Image (cartoon, grey):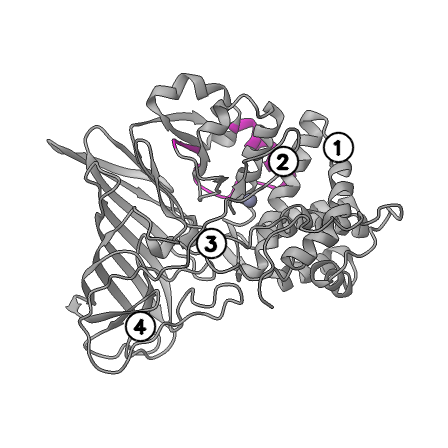
Amino acid sequence: MPFNLHPRPIPGPRRVRRSTAGLLASAVTVCLVAAGAPAEPLGVGDRLYPALGNPGYDVASYDLAFTYSGRNDKPLSAVTTIRARTTATLDRLNLDFAHGTVESVEVDGRPARFTGAGEDLVVTPDHPLPLGSWTRITVRHTSDPVAAKGQEGGWVRTTDGLAMANQADAAHLVFPCNDHPSDKAMFTFRITAPNDYTAVANGLPTGTARGTRTTTWAYRSAHPMATELAQVSIGRSTVVHRKGPHGLPVRDVVPTADRTTLEPWLAKTPDQIAWLESKVGTYPFETYGVLMAQASTGFELETQTLSLFEKGIFTEPAYPKWYIESVMVHELSHQWFGDSVSPRTWSDVWLNEGHATWYEELYADEKADRPMADRMKAAYGASDRWREAGGPPGRPKPPAPGQKIGIFRPNIYDGAALVLYALRQEIGRPAFERLEKVWVQQNRDSSVGTADFVRLASAIGGRDLTGFFDAWLYGAKTPPMPGHPDWKPAAPAPAKGAGGPKGGA
Ligand SMILES: [Zn+2]
């Protein structure tokens, strides 16, 4: 998930999210073609994002083609081809898409009617799609990098082009999709840009075609991916290659002008991968690297195989070296926790952020002499306040209106890492370390939820831990920390204390 960096005091990580003013605008500019029965927006019932995803089909693959003009304030022309299998008989189907103009839709090669409803593109094929059938949907559309008022995420405009930050619910600002991590799919990308740009996407390159004025770059993912983790970088970039553990291809994408300055940071990745492999097992994907974007996003993001960072955090002298390294490890550890093993619902996001914070802290403990226990004790002191402000880690409060990434509060970062610490205290270090390895190995390339984690922890811990997790994940108050009876919640903060906005029920 986004990992917020600034503004922050030194030392120690603090995540303060930018506030985004404005209402959540409905920015659908889909051409209205269809008549007939009223179309309505649908979702898969996510408690935090009810409009995300759509029922009735399972996407197997996305083929995304973008044509970039060289101007990042103009819409890209795009073709999105979705191959899906129906899980119901469908007279029509919904895709999530909310920020572009749809020019045409074809289903299985035949023109289909389409209309907009909320943040959905509702497609009516010329014949019903039977249950259990394969279908191919081709949408010709634009993809607008200029955010509408109140919109967050999707394309990120950099000083030299574009990058992407779709978490949690913004992939459908870029391309039509089933925008929920419970429906992972394979991805191919074809990006056409003027010859002086470099385009990079998730996965490995499959070919480059250079013309007289433009170049088309193609990439393919070797593993299924959630839409929120898609990444496309277009910029005046250099791709730097090196080898990671076991010959893993590591490729970083950096502004060409900064390549030498950034090299000391880039060189750290192979050892960080090796360190994480020693903790949780083999790196789960075909490649890794960091994308250093010339943008101020206010966060870093674990896009699959190519994590997005603001270039500025590596050149800003105020950040201590150990801290930047632990942020790199945070995003890297998401490749196991959050990317390879995805949350089934957004309420399971503590499994992403709790683990990423855990390894971020463990790395700082082992490599920079920043004791994890100290940070856990501090988190314990704040945990009741975080629970009150953001909900308990396993049941975060919905985002406030106009702040759709507002679920990324301390309760799911340090608050959730604290749950893992309590678990390690409860079942002991050897069982905990085994649980971590088995969890990522058993659930590789899938979407799983909290109940799955509780079940596995109980099996490996040798006893039913349902009650333990109920208290730690869902309690309004933080339970006593096993083995640390002296840890106490800090006194309530005066008046407008820590924590985010109070969401709904
Ligand atoms: Zn994170």
Which residue extends farthest left?
212
| Extent of the magenta region | 269-294
Mark positioned earlier in the residue sequence (1 or 4)? 4
Q: CA distance from mark 1 to mark 4?
A: 52 Å
Is the residue under label 4 in contact with that under label 1 (CB below 8 Å)? no
Q: CA distance from mark 3 to mark 4?
A: 22 Å
Report the residue at 53% width, 25% height from top. Answer: 268
Q: From this view, report whether residue 398 is shown above or below residue 64.
A: below
Q: Position of residue 191 (x, y in %)?
A: 24, 42
Mark positioned earlier in the residue sequence (4 or 2)? 2
Q: Is residue 279 magenta?
A: yes
- The label nearer to you, 3 versus 4, is 3
Residue tagged 3: 168
**Residue 224 visible in the snapshot:** no
Looking at the rendered structure, the kind of residue marked 3 is: Ala
Residue tagged 2: 13
Mark 1: few/some/many CA within 10 Å (<14, 14-19, 20+): some
Looking at the rendered structure, the kind of residue marked 2 is: Pro
Residue tagged 1: 371
Q: Which mark is residue 93?
A: 4
Mark 4: few/some/many CA within 10 Å (<14, 14-19, 20+): many
Quarter of the image for residue 204 reads top left
